[in-house]
Amino acid sequence: MVGKNDFPKKGITDEEFRVREQLIELGIPFDIDFAICFECSGRFVISKGVYPNKCAKCGIVYTKEGQYCLPDFQIYHKNLPIRSGIIEVNGNVHDKVDRQKKDRIKIEKLQKLGYAVFVIHANLFKNLPNMLLRLLLWSMYLCLNNTALYDISIKGEKELFILTGKK
């Protein structure tokens, strides 16, 4: 679990930094700097800014796009071995049609592995008070232990993006 002094601001966006601060304030356990292999379903730690060339779990060498992903955050429940969640904080590069297609495929793969996936568009942070961000993150945390709540949360989201900042 990450603590208040375990991460520098350098190398992350302001939006990601705010999410980290609020997760810590809420006491929601989370991890950063990891990869998920879609070949073996393994999860392994990476160095910040490093793209793995092979899986640290199964050893497969990555030769094509889409064999792994580098989520921004993984949240999990403190006391219950229920599914964990992935939070992605997406900037404007994710507005491009080809990128959205890749993002949808990644989200679907993560969901098939049992993760609850939440995507927040960075544009939402401009006017979002910390109180509302905390409520949003706490709702995501509650979804880990409540499949019905998660299903209701993403219902009608054609691209599986919970909050895109767009209609």
Image: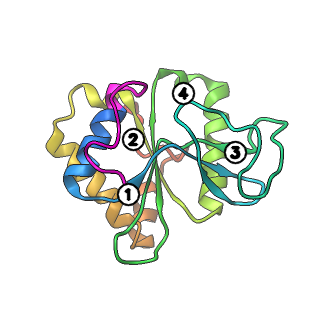
Residue 163, which numbered label? 2
Residue that badge 3 annotates? 68
Q: Earlier in the sequence, mark 3 or mark 2?
A: 3
Magenta stretch holds residue 57: no
Do tag 1 and tag 2 residues touch (Cβ < 8 Å)? no
Q: Main secondary structure of the magenta part?
A: loop
Q: Earlier in the sequence, mark 1 or mark 2?
A: 1
Q: Secondary structure at mark 1?
A: loop
Residue that badge 1 annotates? 1
Between the residue at mark 1 and the residue at mark 2, the CA separation in whole angstroms equals 26 Å
Between the residue at mark 3 and the residue at mark 4, the CA separation in whole angstroms equals 17 Å
Amino acid beneath label 2: Leu
Q: Position of residue 25 (x, y in %)?
A: 19, 51
What residue sits 61% from the left and 53% below the top? 44
Between the residue at mark 1 and the residue at mark 3, the CA separation in whole angstroms equals 22 Å
Amino acid beneath label 4: His
For residue 123, above or below residue 159:
above
Q: Which of labels 3 and 4 is toward the front?
A: 3
Q: Quadrant of the N terminus?
A: bottom left
